[in-house]
Amino acid sequence: MTSFKFASLRLFAAALAVVALAFVSLSPAQAAPKKDFKVAWSIYVGWMPWGYAMDNGIVKKWADKYGINIEVVQFNDYIEAINQYTAGAYDGVMATNMDALAIPAAGGVDSTILIICDYSNGNDVIILKGKDKLEDIKGQRVNLVELSVSHYTLARGLESIGLSEKDVTVVNTSDADMIAAYATPQVTAMVTWNPMAAEILATPGAYNVFDSTKLPGEIQDSLVVNTQTLKDNPDFAKAMTGIWYETMALMSAGDEAAKAAKTAMGVASGTDLAGYEMQLAATAMFYKPEDYIAFTEGNLAEVTSFVTKFLFDHGLLGDNATSPGYIGIELADGTIVGDANNVLLRYNTEYAKMAAEGKL
């Protein structure tokens, strides 16, 4: 099995929200307008296009068009990338919707999801050893990375069959140890993500009893930007949107250039073309702005309620949170989910619509 690096970076940085809070007071006041912007990203299948765009002149092309400078900076530590964004050192960061809520939003940093790059569509899996029904998980010890997307997947899976986390015992296990742990006799239930899940499922007696195809749109991987920076610098948003959709058009063209681009992304993430395409197969990428717009203007209120409930139940919305709706979330149509007086996360389709209309 080809080795991969992307998986370990999809953790909830939420557990370090207290650290992030310490940085918020250091954030510089936003000045409008400005010319230089920095965006942090880390290795993950849906975010590899940003690194490719930076390395192959697409970022520079769009930045030059608007007379600005954009640096898309790779972090080896996903958590640190979000902390740096929360501290004000970066104008944007690639993060899950859950982490955007649990760190910058919980830390008081008003943030906007400018683009949802993708959502997990099978990458996250509940695996049982020798049992082929999710109901068989009751009473078992379940190995997973605590407070990760795996933990969320478990909670949602249990909920789907009328169980809760009280019906199992969660065993915190490093993602780096998953494959070795599964090989031991005492491990009979596990929640993990690709490529580890694919390797484990290739072994005899391993069964996929629940995965994120049953949670469409819930585990989102997005470009999150500072809301004030966005308001003060619309050209920054236009450039970032143009970068993404030009790269998406290149990737999805089905020609030799697309193959070369995906090969480069695979190599950069520690795999090859076949490995990268395997990851893509379990990832719902938004290749066209119209697809992102339709998704974002769909039933996100319900999706959001699932996510905020998990975060609240696990104490990840901050010490002052009194309900799952403690942090207000503004949807693309202006609807507020949660506290309208504490809106700290917003979805935006304005610039995607400009892309769809050829107006960037």
Image (cartoon, rainbow, N blue to C red):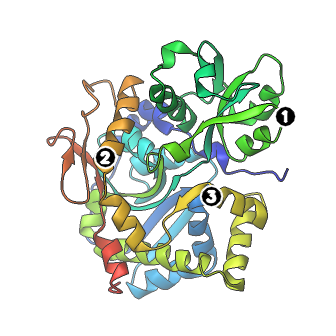
**Residue 204, disc:** 1
In the rendered image, residue 329, in percent from the top left (x then y), is placed at 26, 46
Q: Which residue is mark 3?
A: 45
Of tags 1 and 2, which is closer to the observer?
Answer: 1
In the rendered image, residue 103, in percent from the top left (x then y), is placed at 40, 40
Decide if residue 216 is on the left or right side of residue 351: right
Q: Residue at x 51, y 43 (%)?
A: 214
Q: Is residue 260 above or below residue 185?
A: below
Mark 3 residue element? helix
Disc 3 residue crowd, few under 14, some 14–19, many 20+, Cα 10 Å: many
Between discs 1 and 3, the one toward the N terminus: 3
Q: Residue at x 57, y 60 (%)?
A: 46
Q: Which residue is mark 2?
A: 109
For badge 3, the amino acid type reads: Val
Structural distance between the alpha carbons of marks 2 and 3: 27 Å
| 109, 30: nearer the viewer | 109
| 88, 202: nearer the viewer | 202
Q: Is residue 350 above or below residue 113?
A: below
